[in-house]
Amino acid sequence: MKFLKKLFKVLIVCFGLLIAILYITDTDYLIKAVRTIYMKGHTTAFLEDYKEFDNQPIAASDHPQAWPNHNEYNSVEPTETLKKANIDWGTIAYVIIKNDSIWFEKYYDGFGEDSKSNSFSMAKSYVSGLLGKAIMDGHIKSLDQPVCDFLPAFCEGKAALMTVGDLSSMASGTNWDEAYYSPLSITTRAYFDDDLAKVMNGLKVVNDPGQSFKYASGDTQMLAMVIEKATGKKLYNYLEESFWKPLGSENATLWQLDSEGHDLVKAYCCIASNAKDFARFGKLYKDHGKWNGKQILDSAFVAKSITPRFPESPEYGYGFWMNDYLGKTFFMMRGHLGQYVIVQPEDNIIIVRLGHSKGPGNPLESFTSDIGLYVEEAYAMLGEL
């Protein structure tokens, strides 16, 4: 018994020392990481982790607009290839929208059409859209306005050359390290730290901004801080009034915060919503920024957003990804673990897939093989291959 008491005391002392070391080394965010992610058996963020964090509610539209069902609604079964992929890779929602009508929808793993799940980096498309809205509203001059005009921490050396457009197109030149599975990366810190502004203001611009594409979630987070400073509005309120309500969203949503005290959204990720409400933003860009005949977002900004900024990086524009499948060009919103809103404007098709995994292969590749499968099998179901 004495041995057990002694051992218990030693463990308590060791635990106390560990906690002290985490605070001394400014890695105390790992305490939240262990509590919310790792102790639940996950090695990275997961679809319903929004329940473990502070969130800001965003109201549904005052005039919700349900998607109409296509006259061929759910008349075709998923292909065998798609069925297998949906089971093996943990799909929770797969929706095909044809001519602005729901042509097919199916939900899995206990999720339904109104169930919330994490957008992950699909949120970046919304933030880029809010930049366009801030320009349209006159709060920001243009894509070429310096970040320094809004964030004093980026006014010296190469940082002074960085523009808001550089942030939207992932060309900031910062030392951000996009590493999802390392507990010590800045990406992990940003996910769990309760003061995101402090993390962002500590970034360094190490390469000339505006010269090349380098995917960096920190760029979107900085852009959110710029938009809040420019508009004088919290980003969640700006999203609600600019897009969520005007696009007729049927469900209220949540946007994760760094903490209630600092009240800054995790702008690079973490809007908790559902497939059909996520699809609305894809439709807005498909329709050149118009919704029900009203110009919600400037059409020139939309066109620029879904056009590659750098010829050597044809996969990215301003907040949106582009790729070719079946001889057609698609633009898409894309998020961790395989969250997709995939749009083919000429065919008037939107494909939404939400789920737990991208399947086998390197999950950090720009375009994992699952994307092509979801596109090809949708077209096979539509009889358009």
Image (cartoon, rainbow, N blue to C red):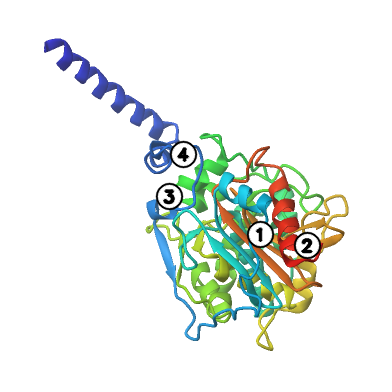
Return the disc, 1 or 3, that comes first in the chain's sequence.
1
Q: Where residue 330 is drawn, which disc sits there?
A: 2
Q: Residue 363, position in %: x, y?
A: 65, 41
SS for dot 3: loop
Q: Is residue 280 left or right of residue 320?
A: left
Q: Residue extending furthest top?
A: 3
SS for dot 1: helix
Q: Residue 352, position in %: x, y?
A: 63, 62
Q: Where residue 194 is drawn, which disc sits there?
A: 3
Location of residue 353 (image quadrant): bottom right
**Looking at this view, is 33 or 140 the one in front?**
33
Q: Residue 293, position in %: x, y?
A: 69, 89
Which residue position holds label 1? Answer: 148
Frontmost of labels 4 and 1 is: 4
Q: CA distance from mark 2 to mark 1?
A: 34 Å
Marks 2 & 4, CB-CB < 8 Å contact = no
